[in-house]
Image: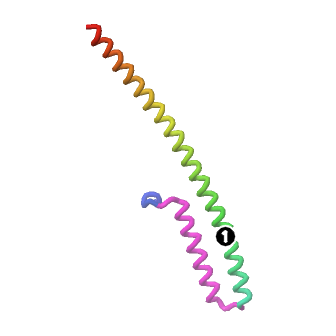
Amino acid sequence: MSEERGYSGSAVALGFILGGVIGASMAMLFAPESGRRTRERLRDLAADMRDKTIDLSEELRDKAEDAVERGREVFEEKKSIVSAAVQAGKEAVQRERERLSSH
């Protein structure tokens, strides 16, 4: 459903992660705990978020690299088809010239 609206699965996942982090941060800031404990939890949450962000960025980079490689493959395939069509066209023109010049 998200891709129907133009959002990739990774973008949706990042949105959920960021929303969760913001919500958890707000909950901790307003929770009745000591400042020290709250800072520890925020530090842990930040480290967790950093790790998830790194994982997600690596996943996105891998997907982008795969997409680029697939694009190159498709380009080379289409380039080959177009080259063959151009060559066939040149040969057809040459045959037609020879046929017309022989009459």
Q: Is residue 28 magenta?
A: yes
The foreground one among 27 and 102 is 102
**Image height of 93 relative to 102, above or below:** below
Residue at the extreme front of the image, as rendered: 101
* Residue 42, image x, y percentages: 68, 81
The foreground one among 63 and 12 is 63
**Image height of 83 relative to 95, above or below:** below
Q: Where is mark 1, residue-wise?
A: 50
**Label 1 Cα crowd, 10 Å radius (few <14 / some 14-19 / many 20+):** few
Instruction: Give the left or right position of residue 102, taking residue 11 as reference.
Output: left
Instruction: Give the left or right position of residue 18, taking residue 97 as reference.
Output: right
**Image height of 91 relative to 12, above or below:** above
Q: Residue at x 51, y 44 (%)?
A: 71
Count of numbered labels shown in the rendering: 1
Q: Residue at x 68, y 67 (%)?
A: 51
Instruction: Give the left or right position of residue 57, taking residue 99 as reference.
Output: right
Determine the main secondary structure of the stretch shown in magenta: helix
* Residue 98, image x, y percentages: 33, 12
Q: Quadrant of the C terminus?
A: top left
Q: Residue at x 50, y 39 (%)?
A: 74
At mark 1, the secondary structure is helix
Q: Which residues are magenta?
A: 7-34
Query: Which amino acid type is shown beneath numbered disc 1?
Result: Arg
Q: Is residue 102 magenta?
A: no
Q: Residue at x 44, y 27 (%)?
A: 84
Residue at the extreme left of the image, as rendered: 103
The foreground one among 28 and 87 is 87
**Image height of 90 relative to 62, above or below:** above
